[in-house]
Image (tube, rainbow, N blue to C red):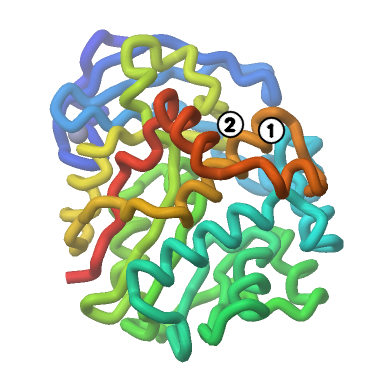
Amino acid sequence: MTSQSSPERPCRVCDGVTQRLGSVHGSFSGRDYELRRCTTCRYAFIANPWTEFDRIYDDRYYAGRGADPLVDYQFELDDPERTIRVYEWRGITRTVEALVGGLTGVRWLDFGAGNGGLVRHVLEHTGAAATGFEEGSIAARARLAGIPIESALEAQSASFDVVTAIEVLEHTLDPVAELRRIRQLLRPGGLLLLTTGNAAPFAANLTRWPYVVPEIHVSFFEPGTLRRALQRAGFRPAAMPGGGGFDEVLKFKVLKNLRFRRRTILTDLLPARPIAVLADRRTQLRAHPIAWAE
Ligand SMILES: [Zn+2]
């Protein structure tokens, strides 16, 4: 049944009424998926998600032969200095440093750490005590490379100063529950820095937004939606800081979408600031909030 607005499928962020936007074809699974959006907070989601997570997040996925062809985790693990991902790691690190004032001794958890690349970068370049959390099969290989990645986080309540969740929230079917889980891991006053797509610039035609890869991306946020979800989970949202850190994150995203993988002298020389300004006119990622644990 695909009713126009279905009270039986309330919004997972605000409990409001949701409305069907249309269907999106998943080319990896060969199935069609229903995209819906809340009429109140504008949270958008895949209403009939593929939930065979073992089949989605298998070894092929992490090698870029699954639902996301831009995933390149094994190369990043084997050759961290030669991947363009290093711009993202550096940008995240600089952004966190600007927000918390210094990284020495900071207890930092990367939630949804994937191959552990950010954790390793933080450990090698700062004085922070970084660790990762990852449930997927890639975590085993990260551990073989000596990167501290946990696959369970019981009994770690309030034990972190910083949590990063880089491209995590769009994968989860219940974002407020996931944010509450993160909130419990942070001490009061701790920082959450997350990245996820901004649906706002694409709101008029969301079923055609390339970020809607329905097998793996199931939750979509405008900045106001994200602020609301964060508040419900016990956070105080705040503006993403200006400055060079986030510019480097945006530079990485531009290069990734242009199918660059390897870092070269040329990609090093590309100035992050103008690239970030241009890219953000279209993606508006800097409009998403950061958050402090209440
Ligand atoms: Zn809502």
Quadrant into which the N terminus falls: top left
Is 257 drawn above or below residue 149 in the view shown? above
The quadrant in which residue 142 appears is bottom right
Front residue of 76/267: it is 267
Q: Which residue is mark 1?
A: 67
Q: Where's residue 26, x and y in %? A: 61, 20
Residue closer to the observer: 173 or 69: 69
Q: Which residue is outermost to the bottom?
A: 105
Total marks placed: 2
Q: Are marks 2 and 1 in contact (CB under 8 Å)?
A: yes
As drawn, is 115 to the left or to the right of 5?
Answer: right
Q: Which mark is residue 217?
A: none
Residue 181 falls in which quadrant of the image?
A: bottom left
Residue for point 43% across, 32% down: 280
Task: Give, as a three-letter code, the residue at label 1.
Answer: Ala
Identify the residue under disc 2.
215
Which residue corresponds to the image point at 34% horizontal and 12% vertical from the top-left? 21
Q: Tag 1 or tag 2, which sits nearer the N-term?
A: 1
In the image, 243: left or right of 184? Answer: right
